Image (cartoon, rainbow, N blue to C red):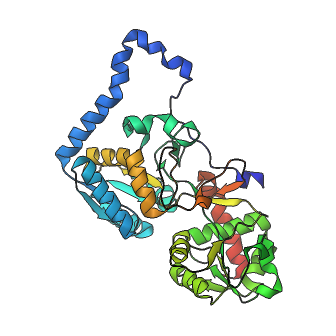
Amino acid sequence: MADHFRLGRRRFLAGATAASTVTIPLAFGGRRMADAQPNAFASLIAAAKREGTVVVDGPPIDATREALTRGFEKAYGIPVAYVSSGSSQSAARVRAERAAGKYLLDVFISGSDTPTMTFLPNGWLDRVEPILVAPDVIDRRKWKDGHLLYEDDQHTILRVLQFVTPELAVNTKLVKPSEIKTWKSLLDPKWQGKIIAKDPSISGAGASLTSYFYLTFGPDFVKQLYKDQKPILSRDARQAAQWLAQGNYPILVGPDTTLVVQFQRLGYPLSPVFPTDGPAVLSGGYGLVSLLNKAPHPNAAKLFINWLAGKDGQEIFCESILAVSLRNDVAYTSVPSYMFPQKNQKYLDTYDYKFVTEQRDPALGKARELLGL
């Protein structure tokens, strides 16, 4: 099972060479080469300003909408037309638009499924890697492990977020976190009927968690947890978090981290729990960035992606969405410490391309069949 838990594959910038080779061109006009990227960035800014606007489909979160639109316009004076219909709805809209010969969207910021499973195979995207020219973006020293991370091997979809997401939370007035040290602790008969669980029949993050259980612990665990323990299955993340906060139920499997933090800040006795008998889970949240081909504002789109991948853009983005950047120079003020990945910790990266495209759905299908869903 080790292959299932390998940290997401690292996709290095194409053409990266050892540091010792970088100095060779200096004898052949190296000064001009050193200035090439800043000059390219300056040219991009000028071209983007001439286009006058950029259309971005991003997270359906008001704080993120405000942060990104205000931040980019403040930086470059270019207004952002921001739409946030949600990933699956975005795919349907773009499909209909393109079928009608309309190309209205410039940039797509999303989770893993829609760009990877729909936009990319349908040929709607241009590669992001060649359009990254901002000096602080292409400086590999600014990124985790010394390189940018792409979702796909062709470096079409840029990934900018990676963080630990707790998949279990408890109300500490009703349950001590030490009572549930392992996932298998949830199978204790005393918890029967006292667990809220994300409905395994829905798509998205709930699907990844169910697949995780099936791949990690096998079919018997899945059946015991989702059927024998008689959990309350929820499709409403806010309602589930509220039930936990109010003490209606002591345990929540598959919590929305942002909601848990919000209730904690309101004084409710909630605590995330990280069971020790399985790898912790890494997510990318809304951290995949795609460039639409035939974009109506191609230069403004490229500039927006460079800004979003830069330090200033990432600080604004991460604070608005409660996430951790793959950049190593981002300052945080409100992101909980447990969301930061740690060295020598075993993780399952649910945004790894192989997990998303090869492992997750077959495991999910078997789990759903087992549960009669």
Q: Would residue 230 be found to the left or right of residue 264 on screen? A: right
Q: Visible in this render: residue 343?
A: yes
Q: Would residue 191 be found to the left or right of residue 41 on screen? A: right
Does residue 95 sit above or below 243 in this rendering?
above
Q: Position of residue 236 (x, y in %)?
A: 52, 82
Q: Position of residue 287 (x, y in %)?
A: 48, 56
Q: Nearer the viewer, residue 99 or 266?
A: 266
Q: Nearer the viewer, residue 240 or 99?
A: 240
Does residue 191 sit above or below 124 in this rendering?
below
Does residue 175 sit above or below 138 in this rendering?
below
Q: Give the number of marks.
A: 0
Q: Position of residue 259 (x, y in %)?
A: 52, 74
Which image quadrant for residue 240? Answer: bottom right
Q: Nearer the viewer, residue 166 or 147?
A: 166
The quadrant the N terminus occupies is bottom right
The quadrant the C terminus occupies is bottom right
Which image quadrant for residue 370? Answer: bottom right
Q: Which residue is at a point 25% across and 53% down the rendered structure image? A: 73
Q: Visible in this render: residue 105?
A: no
The residue furthest top is 27
Q: Would residue 307 be found to the left or right of residue 9 on screen? A: left
Q: Which residue is at a point 75% across and 75% down the rendered structure image? A: 222
Q: Position of residue 131 (x, y in %)?
A: 37, 39
Q: Which residue is at a point 28% across and 46% down the rendered structure image? A: 298
The residue furthest front is 267
